[in-house]
Image: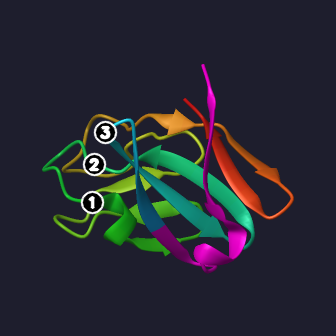
Amino acid sequence: MKEITLAKIDEIPTGSGKQFLVEGLPIAVFNVEGRFYAIDDTCTHAEFSLSEGTLEGDVVTCPGHGAQFDLKSGDALTLPAVTGVRTYPVKIEGDLIKIVV
């Protein structure tokens, strides 16, 4: 496992997500009221970018067909998705957002 610096905290406004390519893998990082979560950025139902979805609390809704995922666990919460997404540990060091992959 290794730690990778992705961005500065102020690059991801509260209530939004942003996609990063980490070793060729799209990963979405979300800012939920100052708490940061990282998950695979691809919906397991139809391969839409979850970083472009809407946030409500710790839940992101896929912009494609409305499947919802828990940002803490990666679990799929609603159909049409039945498989969850991978989550990644997030570390904040100073003003930097880092993940462990």
| 81 on left or right of 59 | left
Look at the picture and state if 58 lies above or below 37: below
Please state which of residues 24 and 76 is positioned toward the viewer in this rendering: 24
Q: CA distance from mark 2 to mark 1?
A: 5 Å
The secondary element bearing badge 1 is classed as loop
Quadrant placement of the N terminus: top right
x and y, in percent, of residue 20 in the image:
42, 55
Q: Residue furthest top?
A: 1
- In the image, residue 14 lies in the stretch drawn in magenta: yes
Magenta span covers which residues? 1-17
Name the residue tied to disc 2: 42
Where is residue 85 shown, x and y percent of the image? 38, 38
| Structural crowding at the residue carrying mark 3, measured as other residues with C-alpha within 10 Å and reported as few (<14), some (14–19) or many (≥20) | few
Left or right for 96, reference 100: right
Residue at image mark 1: 49
Mark 3: amino acid: Gly
Task: Work out how far the residue at label 2 is from the one at label 3, CA to CA, in angstroms.
Answer: 13 Å
Would you call the spot at circle 2 few (<14 residues within 10 Å), some (14-19), or many (20 or more)?
A: many
**Disc 2 or 3, which lies upstream in sequence?**
3
Estimate the spatial distance between the alpha carbons at disc 3 and disc 1, rounded to whole Å: 15 Å
From the viewer's perspective, is 55 left or right of 83?
A: right
Figure quadrant of the C terminus? top right
Question: Could you tell me which residue is drawn at 51 percent across and 37 percent down?
Answer: 87
Q: Amino acid at mark 2?
A: Thr
Looking at the rendered structure, the secondary structure element under dot 2 is: loop
Identify which amino acid the numbered label 1 is placed on: Ser
Give the labeled residue for mark 3: 24
